[in-house]
Image (tube, helix red, strand yellow):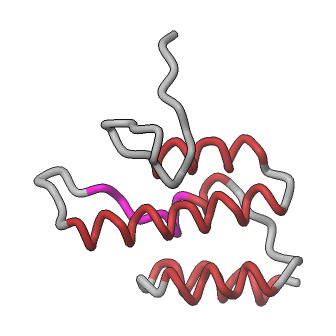
């Protein structure tokens, strides 16, 4: 039970995010924690990123959100869906998260 968790962590830390997420999807014994979800979520660049990089970041973040949702970590899924949405929301946003005013 410990080995898939260690493999997941090592893959994520080495930057192989797709492989880490695939391992977690195929291994139900890997518990997704807040730390692990953040580890496999690519960070948004401050100076801007190309459209391709932004789409890849969104796709990976949505994949992590779906994984969290399937494992019952709904609070993490909401957090990841919110991170994946664009700053300028539109009704055609593929993530489907609406900006809410407090």
Q: In x, y percent, where is residue 82?
A: 52, 42
Q: Is residue 88 left or right of residue 81?
A: left
**Position of 62 relative to 74 (above/below):** below
Q: In x, y percent, where is residue 5?
A: 73, 80
Say which of 32 and 95 sits in front.
95
Residue at 66% in and 89% down: 7
Say which of 73 and 14 sits in front.
73
**Position of 5 relative to 68 (above/below):** below
Q: In x, y percent, where is residue 38?
A: 53, 58
Question: Magenta stretch containing residue 67, yes or no?
Answer: no
Q: Is residue 49 left or right of residue 66?
A: left
**Position of 69 relative to 24 (above/below):** above
Residue at 70% in and 87% down: 23
Say which of 82 and 75 sits in front.
82
Q: In x, y percent, where is residue 18?
A: 53, 84
Q: Is residue 64 left or right of residue 95?
A: right
* Extreme residue toward the left, this view: 47
In terms of secondary structure, what is the magenta stretch mainly?
Answer: loop
**Position of 68 relative to 60 (above/below):** above
Question: Magenta stretch containing residue 41, yes or no?
Answer: yes
The picture quadrant where one finds residue 6 is: bottom right
* Extreme residue toward the top, this view: 102
Q: Quadrant of the N terminus?
A: bottom right
Tag count = 0
The residue stretch that appears in magenta? 38-44
Residue at 82% in and 84% down: 27
The picture quadrant where one finds residue 90 is: top left
């Amino acid at each position: 039970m410990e080995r898939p968790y260690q493999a997941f962590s090592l893959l994520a830390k080495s930057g192989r995010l797709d492989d880490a997420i695939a391992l977690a999807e195929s291994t139900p014994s890997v518990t997704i924690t807040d730390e692990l979800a953040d580890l496999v979520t690519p960070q948004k660049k401050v100076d801007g990123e190309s459209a391709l990089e932004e789409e890849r970041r969104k796709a990976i973040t949505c994949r992590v959100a779906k994984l969290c949702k399937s494992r019952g970590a709904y609070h993490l899924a909401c957090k990841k869906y919110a991170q994946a949405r664009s700053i300028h929301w539109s009704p055609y946003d593929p993530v489907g998260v609406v900006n809410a005013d407090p």
